[in-house]
Image (cartoon, coloured by chain):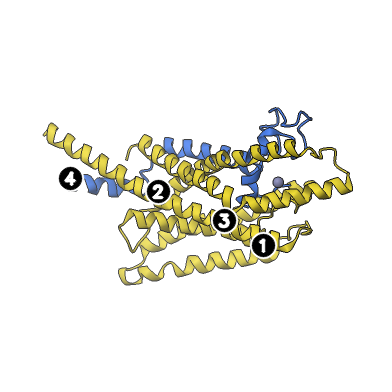
Chain colours: A blue, B yellow
Amino acid sequence: MLVNNEITKKTSAEGVPRIAVGILLGVLAFGVFIVGFDQGEMLGFTVPADGSEGNEPGTNWAHEFYHDMRHAAGFPCH
Amino acid sequence: MKAITFIAITLLAGAIAGTILGAINQVVVEPYIDHAIELEMLQQNTTAQSGQVITNPAEFAAYRFWQKGGEIIAGTILGLSIGSLYGIVFAYTRGSISGTNNNKKKALIVAGIMWLVLFLMPALKYPPNPPAVGNPETIYYRQSLYVAFLAISGFSALGLAFLYRKMMVASSNNTKKKVIIIPSAVYAAIMAGAYLAMPANPDPINAPIDLVIGFRITSAITISMFWAVLGVIFGALWDKANFISNKIAARHNCNSS
Ligand SMILES: [Zn+2]
């Protein structure tokens, strides 16, 4: 038990599994981009809520989807 | 801790904190967003320069219902992604946080620092605005400014965290508590410089100031709460996962010996 704790302590600083870091960084990049920054580049193919072309803010359903959170989380929006 | 356990508790803590954020925003921040969007619709109807005016009240209500529901799911997604970064930072830094061995406390310290670096600093320079403030034509410029400031804050903090760790290793036991002073001062100097050097948000505030300030205060409160909840849940899950994996390891040791 004691030995076991010693080992985890020694590896704690750099013993973070690389695969976990890679996966989590992927989640980070994807989530922050679509909630915070996407202007239709990634989710622009989705069907606009009001049947229009979906290029302007207010017409793309994916944009509507995360729109309020984008404002509330402090990202620049329209 | 196994990679899969680490990923699971990180994503779980982020998803819970983000979903709570989206749900609380429905009550706390949405009244301001509703009001701002009403004003915006009024402006658009009077100037009639936009082709996307929604005049039908039922249609408008459905549209707002969609946006509000989306906010909860967007909260979950944002929580997952910010939580991912948080989990990585915690895993790499918890060994260097001095003064406590309590993982729950460490989790809150990391959340507090990340809140300062990733939320408070950008918010001081480029305060969040409700709908009705902002010119769509400047969005890419405003995004670049925001990302640049966020990057200056984040990468300075990252670099100084490495410096802090090196200084901690090099320092003697009775000076360890003072080591934090230099990296903190350097960070403050960098941020003050960036604050003065970076251009301001180009858009004028043409919405009522009460609305804008109310929105900024309430959204700052809920985002701060998000970071606190993230730290509390993650710390609790981390301890729980460690406890279980130690127990399994102990049992395994007994069986094999
Ligand atoms: Zn907006």
SS at badge 4: loop
Are there few (<14), some (14-19), or many (20+) residues within 10 Å of tag 1?
some
Q: Give how far across and how far down residue B201 sits, in percent.
A: 74, 58
Q: Give how far across and how far down residue B13 sits, in percent.
A: 43, 44
Say which of marks 1 and 4 sits in front. Answer: 1
User: Do callouts 3 and 2 mark residues in contact (Cβ within 8 Å)?
Assistant: no
Q: On what subunit does the disc labeled 4 rest?
A: A
The residue indicated by pointer 1 is B213
SS at badge 1: helix
Q: Give how far across and how far down residue B234 sits, in percent.
A: 40, 48
Say which of marks 3 and 4 sits in front. Answer: 3
Q: Give how far across and how far down residue B158 sits, in percent.
A: 51, 54
Say which of marks 2 and 1 sits in front. Answer: 1
- Give the quarter of the image for residue B166: bottom left
User: Do callouts 3 and 4 mark residues in contact (Cβ within 8 Å)?
Assistant: no
Are there few (<14), some (14-19), or many (20+) residues within 10 Å of tag 3?
many
Q: On what subunit does the disc labeled 3 rest?
A: B
Q: Which quadrant holds the C terminus of chain B?
A: top left
Is the C-beta of the residue carrying label 3 under 8 Å from the nearest atom of ligand 1?
no
**Amino acid, disc 2:** Ile
Are there few (<14), some (14-19), or many (20+) residues within 10 Å of tag 2?
many
Rounded to the nearest whole Å, what is the CA distance between mark 3 and mark 4? Answer: 41 Å
The residue indicated by pointer 4 is A1
Find residue B233 and name its label.
2
